[in-house]
Image (spheres, rainbow, N blue to C red):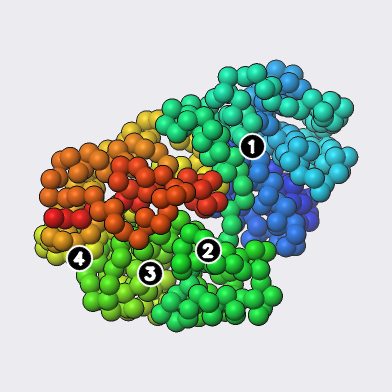
Amino acid sequence: MSGSPKGRPASPRELAMHVLTQVEQEGAYSNLLLNTALQKAALSKSDAGLATELIYGTISRLNTLDYFLDKYVNKGTRKLQPWVRALLRLSLYQIIYLDRIPDHAVVSEAVNLAKRRGHQGISGMVNGVLRNILRQKESLAIPADLPAAKRISLQHSHPEWLVERWISQYGRETAEAICSANNEPPAVSVRVNTTMISREEMLKEMEGHGLQAAPSSLSPYGIVVKGAGNMALTDWYREGMISIQDESSMLVAEAVGPEPGMRVLDCCAAPGGKSAHMGELMKDEGSIVANDIHSHKGKLIADQAARLGLDCIRTVTGDAIELPARFEPASFDRILLDAPCSGLGVIRRKPDLKWGKTEEDIREIAALQSRLLDSVSALLRPGGVLVYSTCTIEPQENEGVVTSFVNRHPEFELDETGSLSRLKDNALVRGGGIQILPQHYHSDGFYIARLRRR
């Protein structure tokens, strides 16, 4: 880790400061930078956990941290060097949001880091700012009399334009619940490979190994596991009995409802979780064509299939818009278009997302989604089912795309009779599809619509 004298392993805070600085300067993804940094740094498990929490937590709470810091930093945080800004942010994050670290320890660690990295003047400034904040810690509150969008934006750390958009789409209470849920740590959930073992037997196995495991309330194939660490390092995973997947995402293959012997197309398939789930539901009988635009991702899909013992999945590489040139019209029984999207349903897992998106991004991606749907729908046989899904909560990308598609294609009708009708009490029915918001089940925000060709 650069910045650590003579090969001494970086402290979790030093590592967090480096990663946060790079994220800001290079616009890189925090999860990729963090993984690389952790591999190099060889921190203990608890230190790696702290570094991870500091990075994701600081990114998640960015505008709230800056709102408070700007009151104490001369000329505001914008004028600081990026690494100093990162250091103050992650220090304030610990003071406000982490109970287990004493405030004086946060300050002395920050001052030491500033001395090592900068000069006396900077460490003095860092010390002054943080001690000032501690003296007035009680006053670190968001004023209650701000306009709704601004208050929610600062209270729950989301860009104001996004909060305004969600208020107009879902109402103020729901918009605030979305923002609050986006700051919860995501649960660890696994999908049981029912071609090998039933969910009940898998639960017994896990309980026998002392794990806290409970059946998913959302998917009949899911198990939520608490405090178990990385499930990809277990024998169950290696032997293909489980896959790691969010509970909302498990609903997609179920909505497709593929049966043994069918011919299925997954248009944008990487990394392959939904293709694999469909293969399991088909008991590995029939065929699934799993397409992705990136050739290196084809290997991810093939590796998943091999690990799970599924032979029915064949990978192809290409732009999904051009799939009709490769296959006969009306030659598939089921089609899944899990469309590229803004990803605004998975902010809990990828907090960087909310700061990088614009309204223009949403408009552009919705236009692409419409073109994809028009194109691949020609490959569905009469009587077949096409499922359109996204991991966003943005109506323009969800019911907007589906409604305009049905208006342009009278040969298609919305099929609301799928098994997901059980979710209607909790989730929203939008444009004939199901919209799951992050607070409904403490899972990812997802949209799923089922279309049948007449």
User: Which residue lies at the image location 14% right of the left edge and 45% below the top edge?
Assistant: 409
Query: Label 1, on which residue?
Result: 61
Mark in front: 4 vs 3:
4
Inter-mark Cα distance, 4 to 3: 17 Å
User: Could you tell me if residue 68 is visible in this image?
Assistant: yes
> Residue 342 placed where, x, y %?
41, 42
User: Reading the chain from its start, which is encountered first: label 1 or label 2?
Assistant: 1
User: Along the line of sight, which residue is nearer the eye, 37 or 242?
Assistant: 242
Query: Label 2, on which residue?
Result: 216
> Residue 146 placed where, x, y %?
62, 19
| Number of the label disc, if any, that sits on residue 333 | 4
287 relative to 180 in the view: left or right: left
Inter-mark Cα distance, 1 to 3: 35 Å
User: Which residue lies at the image location 16% right of the left edge and 55% below the top edge?
Assistant: 453
> How many other residues sit within 10 Å of disc 3, few (<14), some (14-19) or many (≥20)?
many
Inter-mark Cα distance, 1 to 2: 29 Å
| Number of the label disc, if any, that sits on residue 276 | 3
